[in-house]
């Protein structure tokens, strides 16, 4: 039931959007394929709004984006997050002012290939550490310079130099897509991922698989699930056809990461058997290549388990998802970003099991310690935290839960 508190949760935002548009519960529920009584329970917080397909259906009924329905981009009184949000406009402008193959205007001297490649690698480190402020400040100028290098190499010295510049540009675009997505700008994330796909088409080999992974990851929050599934499936089939030709570990890791993304899109679109097949193939590959990443692709046994958890969440198999999470060794995951993202998913499963809600709070706090900005910008972390508190499970969470809700900007 609605506690009458001032705390944010997705259902309250849903109710506000519906009221602004002057649509009745009956109209919105009918368009979304649910009953008015169920919509009422969503709006009061009695039912959780954490199902990807339901979010998309409600967003379509209200004629808004899924991101807007879930309250993105997140804004609250957090100096670090505000600084990170301030990097979005310059990064967006970098994409608007560049075209692959055209020489962009550069406000100074362009750094050399080695220096630019080192900057790209520095960006990967910032991305995995979830330092979105530093990453957002690094990327705009870097992207313009890389576009300049690619364009001038196209006319001056083709071959290894151009290929190196393209590879660096691809990795930078992937980092930019992650940056946009983490801060709540999925459409910009799609633009960055699409630019990576343009670059990958020139590079060939395993690079299109990596680009498809970025595209799928960016597309899912926009609600275009069928399109994401099609991209993932077609790219997976194409990469499988090259598996006999591309056998080095980074290429196999790229293929494995794409298999995992493909499994998730299959689950989201109701193709459970296909999802299981993709996961099984990824598991076999992970045993062969071990842990890889993050410069080319993050893949390995831990990532397979992460996607087993994600797939179980999409199927509403919360006990199964929690069991997968129970087996994870979070300390063995080197990337703070990965630990935080996986912790959020694990907490979502735990929160659905009444006797494990205290563990959900502990897991979210641990994820926050690993990567504060990653958790503070996550709609799923905010949703599960708000709902745990708003549904009066204070016995389970106590001060720890209330403190987390405050840091997420859910309470004053």
Image (spheres, rainbow, N blue to C red):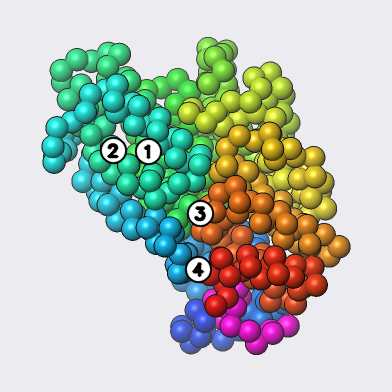
Mark identifier at residue 87:
none
Gap in Å between the C-alphas at discs 2 and 3?
23 Å
- Asked if disc 3 and disc 4 are in contact, CB closer than 8 Å, the reply is no
Q: Which region shows up in magenta?
A: 1-15
Which residue carries the number 1 mark?
Answer: 173
Gap in Å between the C-alphas at discs 1 and 3?
20 Å
- The answer to whether residue 11 is seen in the rendering is yes
Q: Earlier in the sequence, mark 2 or mark 1?
A: 2
Of the pair 368 and 380, the residue shown nearer to us: 368
Gap in Å between the C-alphas at discs 1 and 4?
25 Å
| Disc 1 element | helix
Q: Is residue 160 above or below residue 129?
A: above
Q: Quadrant of the C terminus?
A: bottom right
- Asked if disc 2 and disc 3 are in contact, CB closer than 8 Å, the reply is no
Q: Earlier in the sequence, mark 3 or mark 4?
A: 4
Q: Earlier in the sequence, mark 2 or mark 4?
A: 4
| Disc 4 element | loop
Which residue carries the number 2 mark?
Answer: 143
- Asked if disc 1 and disc 4 are in contact, CB closer than 8 Å, the reply is no
Of the pair 341 and 365, the residue shown nearer to us: 365
Mark identifier at residue 71:
4
Gap in Å between the C-alphas at discs 3 and 4?
16 Å
Residue drawn at x 86%, y 62% is: 355
Residue 328 location in percent, x, y?
75, 39
Of the pair 237 and 307, the residue shown nearer to us: 307
Q: Is residue 108 above or below residue 374?
A: above
Gap in Å between the C-alphas at discs 2 and 1?
8 Å
| Disc 2 element | helix
Which of the 4 image quarters holds residue 24? bottom right
Q: Earlier in the sequence, mark 1 or mark 4?
A: 4
- Asked if disc 2 and disc 1 are in contact, CB closer than 8 Å, the reply is yes
């Amino acid at each position: 039931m609605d506690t009458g508190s001032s705390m944010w949760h997705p259902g309250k935002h849903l109710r506000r959007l519906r009221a602004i548009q002057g649509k009745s519960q009956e109209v919105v529920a009918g368009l979304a394929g649910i009953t008015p009584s169920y919509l009422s329970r969503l709006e009061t917080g009695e039912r959780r709004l954490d199902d990807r397909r339901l979010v998309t259906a409600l967003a379509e009924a209200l004629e808004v984006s899924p991101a807007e329905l879930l309250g993105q981009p997140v804004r609250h009184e957090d100096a670090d997050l505000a600084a990170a949000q301030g990097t979005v406009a310059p990064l967006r402008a970098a994409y608007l002012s560049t075209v692959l193959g055209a020489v962009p205007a550069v406000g100074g001297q362009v750094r050399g290939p080695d220096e630019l490649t080192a900057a790209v690698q520095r960006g990967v480190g910032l991305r995995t550490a979830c330092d979105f402020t530093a990453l957002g400040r690094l990327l705009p100028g870097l992207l313009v310079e890389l576009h300049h290098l690619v364009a001038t190499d196209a006319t001056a010295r083709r071959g290894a130099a151009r290929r190196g510049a393209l590879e660096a540009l691809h990795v930078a675009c992937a980092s930019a897509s992650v940056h946009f997505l983490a801060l709540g700008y999925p459409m910009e994330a799609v633009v960055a991922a699409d630019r990576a796909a343009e670059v990958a088409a020139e590079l060939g080999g395993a690079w299109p698989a990596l680009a498809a992974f970025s595209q799928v990851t960016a597309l899912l929050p926009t609600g275009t699930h069928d399109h994401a599934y099609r991209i993932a499936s077609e790219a997976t089939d194409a990469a499988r056809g090259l598996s006999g030709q591309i056998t080095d570990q980074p290429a196999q890791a790229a293929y494995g990461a794409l298999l995992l993304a493909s499994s998730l899109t299959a689950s989201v679109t109701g193709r459970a058997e296909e999802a299981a097949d993709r996961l099984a193939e990824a598991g076999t590959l992970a045993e062969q290549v071990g842990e890889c990443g993050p410069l080319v692709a993050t893949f390995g046994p831990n990532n397979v388990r992460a996607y087993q958890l994600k797939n179980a969440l999409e199927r509403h198999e919360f006990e199964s998802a929690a069991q997968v999470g129970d087996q994870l060794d979070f300390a063995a995951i080197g990337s703070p970003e990965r630990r935080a993202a996986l912790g959020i998913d694990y907490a979502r499963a735990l929160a659905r099991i009444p006797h494990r809600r205290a563990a959900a709070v502990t897991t979210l706090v641990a994820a926050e310690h690993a990567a504060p900005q990653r958790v503070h910008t996550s709609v799923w972390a905010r949703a599960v935290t708000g709902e745990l508190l708003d549904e009066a499970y204070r016995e389970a969470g106590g001060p720890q839960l209330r403190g987390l809700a405050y840091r997420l900007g859910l309470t004053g």
